[in-house]
Image (spheres, helix red, strand yellow):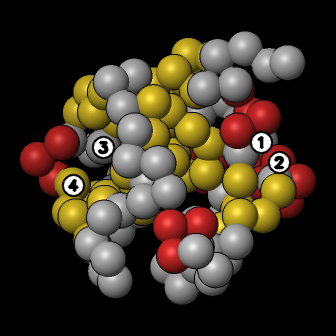
């Protein structure tokens, strides 16, 4: 059983900085095959809403929504990096792009379990 870990992340240009509690550490890491995630994100870890703070660059975040308009996908408007999203499957959680994490090997994303985003749990 993994414990929560304090973590930081940023976009490519560094304007957007995140601090959050990674719920269950890297055990929460998942890949998703939905039409958006397959294009933008190698994998995501989890933070509960209220346990993620945008410590820098909040005014630079651009919001993208599609389909049911429930999930909120945030991008740095300077460098285009997808940093995090508020989940449709659980709006009480954020998914943070594993590629944005400080102090984590991006190759770990290859070991992430897959979520079925094509047949999304909220559509069943
Ligand atoms: Zn940026």
Q: Are marks 3 and 4 in contact (CB under 8 Å)?
A: yes
| Residue under label 4 | 61
Q: Are marks 3 and 1 in contact (CB under 8 Å)?
A: no
Identify the mark nearer the N-term, 2 or 3: 3
| Residue under label 1 | 105
Q: Dot 3, how many residues are within 10 Å of its Cα: few (below 14), some (14-19), or many (20+)?
A: many
The answer to whether residue 38 shows anywhere in this view is no
Q: Give 99 or 51, whichever is nearer the viewer.
A: 51
| Residue under label 2 | 108
Identify the mark nearer the N-term, 3 or 1: 3
Q: Quadrant of residue 6?
A: top right
Q: Is residue 96 left or right of residue 107?
A: left
Residue that protrudes farthest toward the front in the picture: 124
Q: Are marks 1 and 4 in contact (CB under 8 Å)?
A: no
Q: Dot 2, how many residues are within 10 Å of its Cα: few (below 14), some (14-19), or many (20+)?
A: some
Cα distance in 3D space between marks 1 and 2: 6 Å
Q: Dot 4, how many residues are within 10 Å of its Cα: few (below 14), some (14-19), or many (20+)?
A: many
Q: Is mark 3 within 8 Å of ligand 1?
A: yes
Q: Give 85 or 107, whichever is nearer the viewer.
A: 85
């Amino acid at each position: 059983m993994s414990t929560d870990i304090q973590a930081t992340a940023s976009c490519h240009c560094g304007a957007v900085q995140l601090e959050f509690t990674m719920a269950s550490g890297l055990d929460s890491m998942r890949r998703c095959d939905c039409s958006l995630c397959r294009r933008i994100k190698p994998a995501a870890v989890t933070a509960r809403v209220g346990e993620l703070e945008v410590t820098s660059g909040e005014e630079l975040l651009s919001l993208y929504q599609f389909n049911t308009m429930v999930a909120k996908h945030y991008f740095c408007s300077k460098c285009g990096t997808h940093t995090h999203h508020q989940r449709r499957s659980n709006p009480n959680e954020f998914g943070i792009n594993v590629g944005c994490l400080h102090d984590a090997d991006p190759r770990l994303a290859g070991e992430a379990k897959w979520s079925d985003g094509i047949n999304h749990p909220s559509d069943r």
